[in-house]
Structures are given as C-alpha cells and as structure tokens.
Image (cartoon, rainbow, N blue to C red):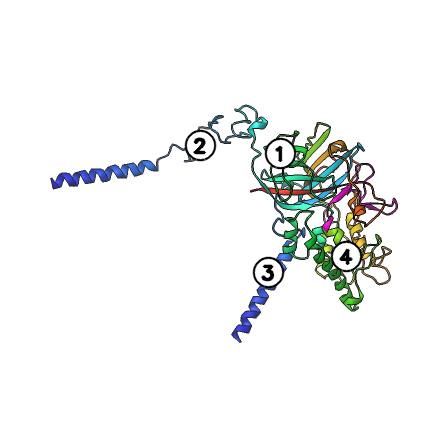
Amino acid sequence: MKNILIHTKKFSLLLLLLFNFLLFVQCKDDDDNGNVIYQVNCEDGIQNGDEQGIDCGGEFCSPCEDSGINFDGTFIQEDIAGRPAVNMIFGFSDLAQNEYNISTVSNRSNFQEEFRTVLEAYHDIYAISLEVPVDDLDFETNVLNWDANIFSTVMSQYDALQVAPNGPTTYYDANENLIFSGRSLSDDVMDITFRLIFGGTDGDRFDGNNNTPQLTTDGVGPGNRDFSLPFPYLEPALTIE
Amino acid sequence: MKKTKLFAVIETLFLLLLCVTLISSDHLDGTNIEGTTSDIADFYAFEGEDPDSTVFIATIQGNLNPGGVTDNANFDEDVLIEFNIDNTGDLVEDIVIQAIKRGDSIHFFGPVVPNQTGLESQIITNTTHNVVQISTSTDTFITNENGMSFFAGPRRDSFYFDMNRFMDIKLGNAAPSGFYTPEESTDFFNELNTLAIVIEVPNTLLGDAPTHILESQGYINGLPQAYNVWVSSKRKK
C-alpha cells in the first residue's frame, strides 16, 4: 500500500513536471532559424504586419477607412505659441518657462509681474557693466508709447498673433504705419521685439552707437531664404549635397 | 567645520546643476518639452496668396540638421497640433483646426467649434475631415479640398536669429557690447530644417474678426480688425 502510494505520488509529480514543462512550450517561432511563416490576419483585431490601421491597409488587407482609424482619447497641453519668442525672452527660469507652456492665453495675469522683473533684469545687466547705478538705467517707454507695465502686460496677457483677415500682414512696419496684423515669414520679429525692449522712445536708445550696447538688432537678416514661394510657402528642406 | 565643507559641496553641486540646466536649454523654451515631439518652434499667421484666405504655419521639432536627422524626424501619433482662433476678442478659442498623424498622413479636422476649451482636447471627428500624405525632403504632397490647402513635412527653417549670442546676453555674458555686427553675427537657423504643418483657410470659415485686441484694450488706435490666433501641442493622456 505504501509502495503504491509512493508510486502514485511519483507519477503525480511526473505529471506536474510535464504539465509545467508544457506551459513553457509555445507555438511562436522565435528561434531565428529563418523559417518564420509570415501570416497577416486582417480580422485579428490588432494592427500587425504592414497594416496601416487595425486590420486595414498594407499589402493584404482592405484599405483603411476613416472609421477604421482611432482618434479617441484626451490630449493634454504640453506647449503653446502665439507671439514670437515670448517664452524665450521673458522666461528666465526653466520653471517659469515650463509653467508658461502649460498655461492658457486668457489666464496669464500671474506672469505680468515676472515679465516686468525680467525686463528690468536685462537692463540691470547693462547698468552693472556700464558702471551705472541699476536704478538709473531702466526700461524706457518705447516707440509705441508703452511703459514697462503696459509692455509686460501686452507680452504676457495678449500673447497671441493678431491676424487681420482684410489686409496685408506685418508684425511691425513703421513705414507703413501698420503693426500687429499677423506674422509673415519675412518679418524680422526678433529685431522688432528687441527694438521695443531696448529702443526707448525713439527706437535707437541702445543701438550700439555713442558707446551704447547694441541691443536693437541681432545683426542677422534672412540671408538667402526665399519668402516668395507659393503654397506651402516654406522652402523645401535643405539636403546634403 | 565638517558641516561647512558639506554645504560647500552641496552649493557646488547646485551651481553645477544650474549650469547644466541652462546650457541644455538650447531653444530656451523649458526643459520639460525641450527637443520632444511636442516642442513647437515657431508660429506664423498671414494673408494668403488668395487675399480672402489666411495661412497658418506651425513648425515643430526644430533644429534638424539636413540629411539623416531630418529624414528620421517624424510627427508623433500621440501629439495633437491644434490651431486656435478667437473671433470674439476674449482670448478663448472659438474655432479650432486639429491636426494629428495616422500612418503616413496627417489628418485635419475643422475649422470647427471645439467641444471644450483650455488645456484638454478631444479630437472632433464629426466635422470636415481632410488628409494629406506627409511629404519628405524630396517629395512634396499637397491636399486641396473644401477650399482649403494642407501640407505637412520637413522644410527649411524660416526663422533667422543669432540664438547663441542671445543666450550670452540672457546669461549676462555679452555685456556691455550686446549683439554682434552683421559681419560678426551668425544665423543659428540658416542651415537647419524643421517639421512644418501648413494650412490655408478661407476667411469665411473663421467668422468675422473682432476689434483688434490692442485697440479694444486701449493700447494702440487705428488697428485693423483681427483674430487672435495661437497654436498648441497636446499629448494623449
């Protein structure tokens, strides 16, 4: 009796081992022997093979239709852009820049004071280097007659492009007496922005002349870029010759 | 004494960390999205060749060197690019045009009134739906449908700026001289590509433009009526 029991136990153990072993046996061919049988199933409910969507597109399945592509889900803001270079110029810390990227245009009153502080910080840098007391060298009301408060308010709280549907586009064209009607590819938005920050009432306050720092232009123009192209307006990508 | 040393070490480490953080911000647009597939480089909005239309251009994933880097760059199926149009003057989007990659194409929805505003979006599929195949450095694909035109793919960067010198200015390393002369300056973006999405839309689909917001706020008089427009990138939750 004892012997039978032992044998039964041994047999059970053997069966268990065999069963366990079978658990690890798969039909999947992943032995890299080059004998993979490639099978595309257009009804398996997953996107595999060369399918362009779930069970559609590619060489074997029927073309994808709109209903076959999934557009579900909720998308959360990670970046935002309106007026050029606002975050680049006025975001003085990573924390501030990251916060700005996940804010909405209509809810930015909390950035105004920081933008104003940054405006003055840029001026302090030059006051120190020119050995002038920092309180004596501040943002000067600019050519638009905007003081530091208004300028920092416009930059922080109205940070969208204002694009005029019924007329020509320019970010700022003093000669045409037209400003903020959009942003075209050719607009030198950085020179315009720096002139509004450092140009003062006449637009030439820190223009590099009379021993002033050169801050109203970055000295860079469009170079050989072509802005006269038809849709899509941008030049083709540069390639390696 | 030991404590002082410890503080000195911590302080040094902190300064080092600060330096690394500043240097790595080469677009200067916040480290959280720096160099990711949702990083917006530039936004343009202007009157189209057809003066009754408006062109919107978003460039994303900038600083692509020509060749392999450009050829390997691609749009992200999890990132929704949303063009926002405020036509009432409250800086809240009234109309959106949504763009997202599926397969080898970008799908466009709208212009349409969004079902929610702000930081979160869903794709609005029961509206005008257009598709354009993503272009390459050598092949350009354009879709013209419903009076609109669509493009998506790599293009030369239109933005020109001495970015490196600006970084010096921002960090206080370019005082008292400031920017360089035209002879000394360098256009950081001159030889770089970027991914671009371009849409041209008849103005009739965008509604009437409100009083220019800088006029209604009392900052400048005599401005033309204008939409407030911006672009956002949103990642799937």
* Callout 1 amino acid: Ile
Give the magenta-colored segment's residue range.
A157-185
Please give the label number shown on residue A149: 4
Q: Which of marks 2 and 4 is nearer the N terminus?
A: 2
Pointer 2 residue: A34
Pinpoint residue A27: horizontal percent, then vertical percent.
Answer: 38, 32
Query: Disc 3 on helix, strand or loop?
Result: helix
Element class at badge 2:
loop
Q: In which quarter of the image is residue A209?
A: bottom right
Give the Cα separation between the discs numbered 3 and 1: 43 Å
The answer to whether tags 2 and 4 share a subunit is: yes
* Circle 3 chain: B
A74 inside magenta stretch: no
Q: Mark 2, mark 4: which one is toward the viewer?
A: 4
In the image: residue A231, left or right of residue A29: right
Circle 4: is it few (<14), some (14-19), or many (20+) Cα within 10 Å? some
Q: How far apart are marks 1 and 2 (CA)?
A: 45 Å
Contact between marks 4 and 1 (CB within 8 A): the answer is no
**Is residue A185 something that shows in the picture?**
no
Q: Which of B43 and B155 is in front in this view?
A: B43
Which residue is the extreme one toward the bottom?
B1
| Label 3 neighbour load within 10 Å: few <14, some 14-19, many 20+ | few
Respond whether the residues carrying marks 3 and 2 are from the same subunit. Answer: no
Left/right placement of residue A213 relative to residue A102 reads right
- Circle nearer the N terminus (3, 1): 3
**In 3D space, how far apart are the residues under numbered discs 4 and 1 (Cα atoms)?**
40 Å
Relative vertical location of residue A118 with respect to residue B121 in this rendering, above or below = below
Whether residue A180 appears in magenta in the rendering, the answer is yes
